[in-house]
Each structure stands twice: as C-alpha cells, then as structure tokens.
Image (spheres, helix red, strand yellow):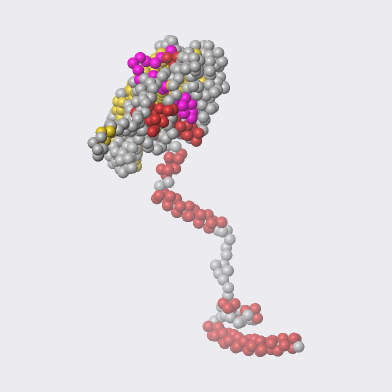
Amino acid sequence: MIAPAVLGLAAFLIIGPAAAAAPTDSGQAAPTPSPDAAAVSSGASAPVPQPSVAPDPTPSVSDGSNYGGNPQNEAALVAVEAKRLAQLRTVSSIARWSGTKLTVPYRVPSATGTTLVLPARTNAYTVDDLLSLAPQTFVKQADGSFLLSENIVIEAGATLSLSNPTPTIYLLSTSKKFVSIVNSGGTLNVVGTADVPIRIGSWDPDSGGPRLVTDNGRSYVRSIGGTVHISHALFQDLGFWSGPTGGLSMVGQPVTSAAGRVRPPKIHVRPPRPPHVSSHGTVTVRPSPPTAPAPPPLQPGATLAVPDSAATSTTSSAVSVTVSDTSITDNVYGLFLANTSGISVHNVQVKNSRMDGIVLHRNVSNAAIMDTTVRSSALNGFVVSRAASDIRLDTDKADSNGRDGIYVDGRSLASGPSATGTALASYGNDVVYGSDVANNGRYGIEARGGKDMTVRANTVTGGLVGIVVDASASAVTITDNHLSEQKVQGIALRDGVTAGTVDNNSVSGAAVGIYLRNAQGKVENNTLSGMTNHGISAIGPDRIQIDTNTITGSGPEPVDLKRASNATAVNTSAVSWSTTRTLWQRLVAFFQPLTIIWTLLALILLFTAFSGHRHRGTVRHPYAAQAPMSTFTDLDPLILPPELINSTVDMPLAERASSSGRRRRWAGNTRRQLARRKLSEPAQGEARVS
C-alpha cells in the first residue's frame, strides 16, 4: 500500500486550468491563483510602468558598514527565500515518489506568495507561454512591457527564453512582497539585440518606478545550477543583502532544505498472500489488501500542496554561465558567481553596485572576464575570493570604486584542523592582464595570499597604493605595469611574501616607488620617476635583490636599505636624484641617541654659566652666612667686653699670654655670676606668683 504521506499528498492535489479560458467542471473559467491580493489583475487596471532613470548616486561606503538597508530584516528574508526554494524541491521530489508525472507547469504556494514551476519539456517556454499560464500575474502593459507578480522557477530539463520582441520585463517589488526568477537546474536565456536589449528590473507601483530601497527585500534573478546565457540585456535595481539574492547571481552548490530531516516516503508493496490451507484440506485464497488509487495526471496550472513537515532534498548542481554585451546597474551585487567552472563574461558594464561589482566567490575555476568595466561600486570592483583559481581578468576596467579596483584573495579556507576538514592549500594561478584601474578608494590591485599569480601590462592610476601583494603570497610576478599618481607607494610587497618578482614596471608621482616590508623578492629593471621620498625602500630581514633600476626625483635618498638587513642594491641609476630633506627628516637625523646626550650636557653647562653670571657683581664674605661658635655655648657674646673681642690679634706673644689669662679669669667670674642669676630666678618667680 502507499505510505500515508503519499496518500496525504495526493489528497491535497488541486487540479485547475493553466489559462483563464480553460473551463472547470462547472463550465466556468477558474482564475489563476494570485499570490497577492494587491497584485495587478489585468492589463487595464495595472499601473503602466514607464521607463525611468534611477538616480545615479556615488556610493560612499568603503567597508559595507553603512549599507543602506535593514540588516536584520533582509537577513531573515534571505533565509525565507532559501526555505521557499527548498520546499519547491521537496514538493517536486515527493510528487515523483508518489507516481505523479510533473510534465506540465504547476504552482506551489508559500508564505511569501505563489511560485509557478516550469518542469522539463522539449520546447522552450516563452513569453507567450507565460501569458497563457499566468494571465493575471504576467501582464502586458500599455507601453509593451510586462509586469510579473509571481515567482517563477525553471526546473532541470526546462528552458525559459526571454528574447525579442520582449523589450522589458518588470518584477513586482513593493514594501510587502517581491518576486524572483530562479533557474533551478534548467536553462535561462535572456537574449536581446544591440538595438533592442532585453531589460529586467524591479518595479514598485507605489512609487511608480524601480524599487530603490532594500529594507523589505527586492526582486532578483538567480540560477542554481543549470545553464545561463545572457546577451544584449540590461539588469537594473535588483537584489538585496546576500550574494545569491544580490541581483544577478549564478551559483552551483549542494542545496539543503530547512531544518529537520525527513526521508522521502517509501512505497511498500506487499506480495500476494499465499493461499490458506485449513486442517480439513479446504483452500482459501486470501485477498490482498486494497491499494490506493494512483494520483490523477497533473493538469497545467495545478497547485501542489506543501507537506506539513519540512523534508530534506539535497542535490548537487553546477552552473554554466555566459554573459556578454550586458549592462548591470544599481544592484546590491552586480554579478555574483560561485561553485562553477568555465565562466565567460565579455563586454559587461557594471555600475553603482551597493556592495561589490563582480564577485567570483567559492570554487570558481577556469573563468575569463574580458573587456568588462566595473565603476562606482561601494566596495571592490572585481573580487576573486578564496577557493577560486585559474581566473583571468583581461583588458578590464575598474574605476572609482570605494575600496579596491581588483581584489584577489588566494588564502586557504582554513589555517588548521576544522570541523569540516577543510584543506590548508592556498589557491592561485590567476592572471590580471592589460586592465585599466583608476581612482579607486584604497588600492588599485591587491593580491592577498595565494600563489603563482601574474599581474602584467596593467595601467594603474591614483589610489593610496597601486599594486599590493601581502599575506604570505608566493611566486607573484608584477611586470610591465604602468603606475602613476599614487599617494603612498606605487608597488608594495609586504608581510611574508616569498619569491616575488617586480620587473620592468614604470612608476611615477608616488612618495615611494617600490616598497618591501618583510618580503623576499627581486626588484629589477624598473623605472621610477618623480619620487618624493624614496625610489626603493626595504624593511626587514628577508633576502632582497635590487638590480638595474633607474630612479629620479627628490628625497632623502633614492634607495633606502638602512632597515633591511639582507638587501643588496647594484647598478642603480640615480644621476638625476635630488637629495632633499624636510624639517622632520632633519630633526630625525639630528636627534640620534649620542646627539641627545651631548645636547643635554651642553644645556647643563650653559645653565650653570648663566646662573653664575647673575651674581658676579656682588662681593660677599665667604663666611657671612656662618654662625659663630659662641652661639652654641652658654656664654652670650653680647656681654663680653669689647676690649676682649679680637683684642689679641696684633699683640706680642708675652702680652697675648697675659691677656689670655685675664680672659680666663673674667670668663670664670662671668660663669659664676650667671649661675647665681639662674638660682635666683626661680625664687623671684615664686614670690611673684604668691
């Protein structure tokens, strides 16, 4: 018999027509389920979208911290979208287990609206098919554009082709709901012409224009596996918060549904029961248990119910991507790619992304991005993140982005043991060639970690530093590049770089042309002009070889190796170097430790000499401040006769002896008089008291 879960699913199957004209059992036309009462119901009552020019602000964020949306709400909506897509896969899987053949389009309701699912078939689904399947949610407007107000999912084996004469498709996006187009293992073709490109963007009926805020989510286009081919198209004002929902994304990845693991229902088929033989020899055939009837065939436009429990449906998918001659404007992420190989992006213009412009996220390999421009992104222009390898950026442009023009991160995903057992290997073999990188907020090109990277024949203008290699990157070659007008350094190798090569580059107008800090490498055949501090500066114990460089400009010295213990410089041409020092540099050079000590000693001597000069005009007796010895005895020097004080200074020896005797006698008499005076003083005091 069929498991109860399958029977319950069959009971929930609601069969309905695909088009409004299809009659029901009662002979009346049944309306197509509408995901929202506020959705547009007909072409006459629908607001007519008029093409409008979205504001073109220059993004001001540099680290994403002042992202203009609602972080908590948008993050929750990303989870809701993931759950909706997981439910779709679950419903489809359970239906197939139950024996239902999903050969015609059907709908699946969810908390956020209805999703029209396009299953596999030989012919591609077109705009005409959408008009037939969803006359109330895919409505043609007076200006010839179309307004989509329900979600669409393209299953494996199905193809949705949006091409001329379909110039514009708007995706409903309001403060209460938004819709999306998701390719789930199928094929999505968006192909226009050079004269009439296909335009896909969000539309807010409340404002009468594209949805410019992302607080409550925003419409997006996404591919999970399958194939995507986009040519001569315009994507505008799409996406919110995350890479997969950021606007236009192509991701191949294992996809798992919401929490809770419920295995697909098993169908138990019992074999016929054997005949029963009684003790009397009577044979009784036991009837087999009744089986549930097979579910009826699915009709176009039918709705499949979502089971009560969240089931797990895990699939692994890859995505094949080709994007050319396309413009992407004002998405959160311009173009987001992950878990794919063999990507081709050619002649794409990305502008005003609210985060990064083009992102090659995890497990992207063998990708070529050529003749593509990323301008005015809030963060980085091009991003090659960890676990991506064999990427080629060829003749691209990165202009006026808030952080780095091109950011390549080749570091490993783990630095030690981890719960998932992630390998410690770094990534690389990337090439940045012939690109024009100008006026970005921080660095022109940054290679962070990784190995075997080549940066060749690029033109880098402006920024704090032109080309930066750091985070223990190895075997990075920087050659034939032209750099100018950097505020700090032209080229910088730092923080553990090994086997770096800086060769045949030209740097002009920077404070320091080539800077090495705790990095090992060779610096050869470079031309550094107009330097204002040093041509080449090195710090640290690593082996550095500097050979045959031409340096012009002014500053303390053309090659600064005072803080590098294992660096050598030979064949340096600095004939036109002008040695100059700022006031600060002069002070730093002057105030060495010994200089400071001698300066302090000189100041002490000067202070002492000045203090002595202040009292030079006054003649004082050397013992004027000394107390006479008589003050420490009982004798009062004031009662001595004047003739006895200093009277023997000029006397002959005999008279001096006689005078000395008289003084002794006089002193004895004086002591006796003082003693009698002391004895009489208490008696007199007592008499006065009485």
Q: Which image quadrant is residue 276 in?
A: top left
Say which of 119 and 620 sits in front. Answer: 119
Q: Which image quadrant is residue 188 in?
A: top left
Q: Which residues are magenta?
A: 104-128
Say which of 174 and 157 sits in front. Answer: 157
| Left or right of residue 193, residue 644 in this image | right
Please name the residue shown 50% across and 24% down the image.
Answer: 35
Image quadrant holding the N terminus, namely top left
Please name the residue shown 33% across and 23% down the image.
Answer: 320
Name the residue furthest left. Answer: 281
Residue 390 horizontal/vertical position (percent): 29, 28
Question: With respect to residue 120, does 658 lie above or below?
Answer: below
Residue 520 horizontal/vertical position (percent): 29, 38
Residue 202 visible here: no
Say which of 267 and 257 sits in front. Answer: 267
| Left or right of residue 645, residue 435 in this image | left
Say which of 655 and 515 sits in front. Answer: 515
